[in-house]
Image: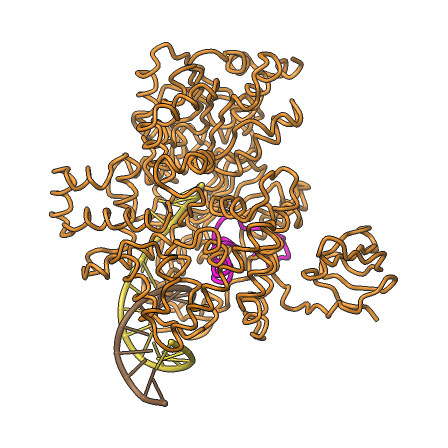
Chain colours: A orange, B yellow, C brown
DNA sequence: GCGTAACCTGTTTTT
DNA sequence: CAGGTTACGC
């Protein structure tokens, strides 16, 4: 029980109040994660609860992983058996187990947003609707919000409100698109992200035996970031905890920033109604930030109406005022931030890892990246373009999906003619029409394609089917890595990339190898019991970031990310850039008061990430979508009480530059608003964005053929430097070399992937 | 069916 | 700007 002594009174109460419903209102920096992990540890250690009886739900993989690690520190290995994960991953797991009950195959595919969009695009086309009236993003968001409110397509079509809404908005067929979309997903054996929650609700609603089983299994239910749950998620947790009623929700209404995807603060009010015996505990002492930061944050959130009563305070040192800095351009803002980081490191002895740069939109990262690179400051980007969204990665994944679920329409479309086999859109349509018109599965239609496709296309499809069958055969007796390897080689994908000797081609080839490495890591990880391809694909579909990569790479890096991604994290120094009207608050969000308040909560989240120092900046011109735009300082800057902010560096009287005429190359001539000329100003460097994958730079390092590698030879590795070969190990089907690197010591390298040069 | 060039269009946050 | 789609000639 020694861990309890470090807690303050409400924290202590929150840990030991294990029985009955409980709601923790946890202010920013109040030690929420600590309380949650201790609570779970306490259940296991003091109440003899079996780990598998505990269900703990988070929003991000990162939060789940962090919590698991911290519980492990207290209770050891047992922590592994706690049902802990994101809503989506936990319920995907349960759905897989119970898939037959709702008519889905056990190996169902999870469609990512791209798959969903492609499918909607196709449906709109097939229905011969105007794609300008039915814009993909709009259609998808309507469908998504319906699903999040648990409205089926039948209900959607029958509901007079949605119908009249759609008619007034000139898109009366939306209900039909919704229907078709659901039907096509079902035929393909696929669920999108929203379906994972929607179908879990259906499963628990229509199958009392299943509900009963899980209700009794989960004696304790915990929900993190409760303010961000939508109705669909809330209903699931409510049902699951209806028997034992030991449900603990943790949240902070001031940090609710996901209303745009259906999160509903009402859930907090509903909770007290649904569980009238709820014990409410408020954690109000902030341990994270200086007084100045806490006060500034409070002064901001105070501008919102209708927050829950809460008084966040701190005993920490007063700290410095918040500097507000104005730059002439986004590029200059980057420079100022980079310089400030450089100085902070020198004078305050900060490490890169203690610094974060936060922004509203992913596209803002560019100017910061360029400045940091010029200053030789190492950085990493969290989120943004994910590794798994790259074309070559999605291509190989499409093959793997096809092996596991050969009815997966989107995977089929992606890989049927890749590499080129002479199967064009005409043949693809015939195959699909043959399936849909005759009520057949896609896979069956593919297998009989020889009967209705003549010539080259027909025989190509037959070869494709044979290829998939061979891979499936492998899949019945080999682990994910071996199957993926087999598929990459036999599909011709790897060969095609290998033959592409352009810089981009090499990089794509490296990326595919990187994916194979990721599969290898997955199968090598002792925590993964199921090493099948199916298990790997499940995992990958719900992992959005590459943080498992970051672990191995350089750890001491400045973190760049959106404010959304930063929730739950903390840094000694935080640079919040782009404090400009229209950008933050975002122009697109300003249609209602509620929207503005959500943006303000986002500002609150950003401020409260900082422990010691918060640095605000804005640019008066910004390069966006190929245009220079003038920017005004954000209205949010006025929300901070003036005693907490230092505006001495923001008061430059220079007029913002205005774009004049067209530009070519790197510079633009600009003019002041008063008509006087200003010197040419650097606005944008026309360069490709930096390669962000873990294998960046790999293209410069061409590996040698290692077939003749022998013991005792000297080799060079891109990352580990020079070393000598100790042993060559050919067991287990993989050729591996044990290399003793000067400095880093012995490493075992997979020769098929390791980037090795033979030295001298 | 394939390859290229011209054209078009988005422009927010995430599982 | 960058990525996706269309039109067109082979």
Residue A146 is a magenta residue: no
- Quadrant in which the C terminus of chain A appears: bottom right
Which residue occupies the foreground of this view, A237 or A264? A237
Q: Quadrant of residue A655?
A: bottom left
Where on the picture, by quarter, is residue C1?
A: bottom left
* Left or right of A70 in this view: A138: left
The residue located at (81%, 68%) in the rendering is A759
The number of numbered discs placed on residues in the rendered structure image is 0
* Residue appearing at x 15%, y 37% in the figure: A159
Question: Residue C5 vs residue A575: left or right?
Answer: left
- Position in image of residue A470 (x %, y %): 53, 60
Judge whether A255 appears above or below A467 on screen: above
Q: Is residue A428 above or below residue A72?
A: below
Location of residue A3 with respect to A65 vertically, above or below: above
Range drawn in magenta: A371-396
Residue A72 visible at all: yes
Q: Nearer the viewer, residue A636 or A89?
A: A89
Q: What is the x, y in percent for residue A381?
A: 54, 50
Q: Is residue A216 left or right of residue A726?
A: left
């Amino acid at each position: 029980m020694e861990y309890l002594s470090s807690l303050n009174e409400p924290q202590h109460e929150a840990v030991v109040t294990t029985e009955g419903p409980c709601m923790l209102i946890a202010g920013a920096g109040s030690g929420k994660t600590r309380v949650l992990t201790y609570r779970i540890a306490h259940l296991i250690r003091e109440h003899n609860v079996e780990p598998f009886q505990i269900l703990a739900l988070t929003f991000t993989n990162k939060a789940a992983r962090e919590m698991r690690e911290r519980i492990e520190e207290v209770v050891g290995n047992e922590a592994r058996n706690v049902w802990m994960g994101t809503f989506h991953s936990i319920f995907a797991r349960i759905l897989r187990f119970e898939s037959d009950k709702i008519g889905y195959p056990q190996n169902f595919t999870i469609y990512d947003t791209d798959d969903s969009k492609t499918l909607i695009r196709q449906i709109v086309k097939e229905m011969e609707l105007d794609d300008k009236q039915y814009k993909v993003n709009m259609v998808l968001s309507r469908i998504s919000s319906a699903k999040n409110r648990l409205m089926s397509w039948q209900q959607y079509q029958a509901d007079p409100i949605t119908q009249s809404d759609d008619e007034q908005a000139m898109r009366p067929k939306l209900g039909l698109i919704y229907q078709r979309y659901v039907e096509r997903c079902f035929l393909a054996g696929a669920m999108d992200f929203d379906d994972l929650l929607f179908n879990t609700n259906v499963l628990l609603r229509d199958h009392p035996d299943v509900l009963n089983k899980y209700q009794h299994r989960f004696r304790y239910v915990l929900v993190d970031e409760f303010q961000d749950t939508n109705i669909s998620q809330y209903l699931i947790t409510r049902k699951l905890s209806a028997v034992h009623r030991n449900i603990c929700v943790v949240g902070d209404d001031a940090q609710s920033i996901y209303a745009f995807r259906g999160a509903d603060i009402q859930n907090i009010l509903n909770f007290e109604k649904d569980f009238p015996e709820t014990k409410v505990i408020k954690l109000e002492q902030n341990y994270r930030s200086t007084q100045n930061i806490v006060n500034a944050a409070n002064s901001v959130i105070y501008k919102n109406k209708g927050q829950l009563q809460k008084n966040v305070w701190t005993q920490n040192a007063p700290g410095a005022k918040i500097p507000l800095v104005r730059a002439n351009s986004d590029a200059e803002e980057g420079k100022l931030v980079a310089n400030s980081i450089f100085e902070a490191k020198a004078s305050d002895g900060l490490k890169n890892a203690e610094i974060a740069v936060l922004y509203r939109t992913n596209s803002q990262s560019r100017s910061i990246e360029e400045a940091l690179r010029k200053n030789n400051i190492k950085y990493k980007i969290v989120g943004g373009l994910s590794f798994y969204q790259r074309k070559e990665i999605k291509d190989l994944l499409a093959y793997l999906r096809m092996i596991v679920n050969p009815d997966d329409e989107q995977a089929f479309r992606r890989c049927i003619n890749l590499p080129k086999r002479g199967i064009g859109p005409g043949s693809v349509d015939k195959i699909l029409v043959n399936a849909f018109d005759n009520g057949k599965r896609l896979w069956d239609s593919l297998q009989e394609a020889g009967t209705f496709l003549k010539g080259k296309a027909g025989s190509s499809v037959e070869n494709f089917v044979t290829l998939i069958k061979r891979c499936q055969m492998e899949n019945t007796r080999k682990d994910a890595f071996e199957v993926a390897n087999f598929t990459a080689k036999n599909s011709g994908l790897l060969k095609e990339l290998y033959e592409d000797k352009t810089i981009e081609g090499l990089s794509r080839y490296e990326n595919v190898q990187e994916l194979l490495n990721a599969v290898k890591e997955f199968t090598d990880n002792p925590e993964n019991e199921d090493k099948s391809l199916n298990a790997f694909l499940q995992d990958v579909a719900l992992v959005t970031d590459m943080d498992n990569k970051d672990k191995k790479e350089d750890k001491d890096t400045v973190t760049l990310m959106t404010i959304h991604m930063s929730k739950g994290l903390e840094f000694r120094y935080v640079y919040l850039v782009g404090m400009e009207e229209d950008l933050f608050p975002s122009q697109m969000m300003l249609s209602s008061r509620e929207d503005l308040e959500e943006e303000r909560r986002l500002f609150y989240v950003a401020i409260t990430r900082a422990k010691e120092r918060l640095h605000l900046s804005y640019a008066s011109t910004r390069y966006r979508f190929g245009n220079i735009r003038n920017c005004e300082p954000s209205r949010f800057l006025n929300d901070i009480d003036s005693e907490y902010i230092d505006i001495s560096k923001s008061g430059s009287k220079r007029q913002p530059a205005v774009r004049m005429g067209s530009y070519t190359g790197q510079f633009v001539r600009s003019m002041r608003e008063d008509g006087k000329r200003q010197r040419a100003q650097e606005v944008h460097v026309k360069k490709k964005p930096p390669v962000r994958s873990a294998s960046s730079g790999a293209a410069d390092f061409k590996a040698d053929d290692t077939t003749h590698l022998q013991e005792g030879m000297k080799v060079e590795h891109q990352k580990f430097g020079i070393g000598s070969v100790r042993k060559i190990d050919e067991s287990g089907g993989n050729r591996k070399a044990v290399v003793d690197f000067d400095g880093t010591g012995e490493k075992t390298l997979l020769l098929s992937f390791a980037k090795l040069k033979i030295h001298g």
